[in-house]
Image (spheres, rainbow, N blue to C red):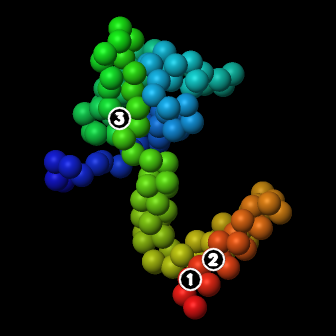
Amino acid sequence: MGRNELQKPTEAEIELLKVMWDRGPCTVRDIHEALQTDTRHTAYTTTLKLLQVMHVKGLVIRDESQRAHRFAATVSREATERAFVGALISKLFDGSATRLVMQALGNDPRANESELAEIRQLLQSIESERA
């Protein structure tokens, strides 16, 4: 792997990235508290260690200008989603985006009317760009 090439985040790292994507730069405590739920409790040191590993991997940057260091994601949500979906299409769906979409929409009743309208609009946009 090249020096400038980012490593793919693990599932645990994605949870931390989601907090930073939603909130922007955060302290370790901010992230740790955001991850605590009724069913999930992690140690503060676990959150800190994950952020340190993510920093080494190039997934976050650390601002050390204040007493409480702040971490910010260096990868966007969109780029991360694109990378994971691309790998999923390639590995599981033999390169067919159509099969992925059919599986996702055909078997998932959670897609509401608003989401389906967004999908229709996206399809129309793609079709008009190709015309």
What residue would you read off at disc 3? 60
Q: Position of residue 92 (x, y in %)?
A: 48, 69
Crowd rating for badge 3 (residues with CA inside 10 Å; few <14, some 14–19, many 20+) = many
Element type at marker 2?
helix
**x 62%, y 84%: residue:** 128
What residue would you read off at disc 1? 129
Residue 22 lies in quadrant: top right
Residue 91 lies in quadrant: bottom left
Q: Are marks 2 and 1 in contact (CB under 8 Å)?
A: yes
Q: Are marks 3 and 2 in contact (CB under 8 Å)?
A: no
Please identify the quadrant where the C terminus is shown: bottom right
Q: Of the residues tagged 3 and 2, which is closer to the observer? A: 2
Name the amino acid type tagged 2. Ser
Crowd rating for badge 1 (residues with CA inside 10 Å; few <14, some 14–19, many 20+) = few
Q: Compare marks 3 and 2 and give the one earlier in the sequence.
A: 3
Q: CA distance from mark 2 to mark 1?
A: 6 Å
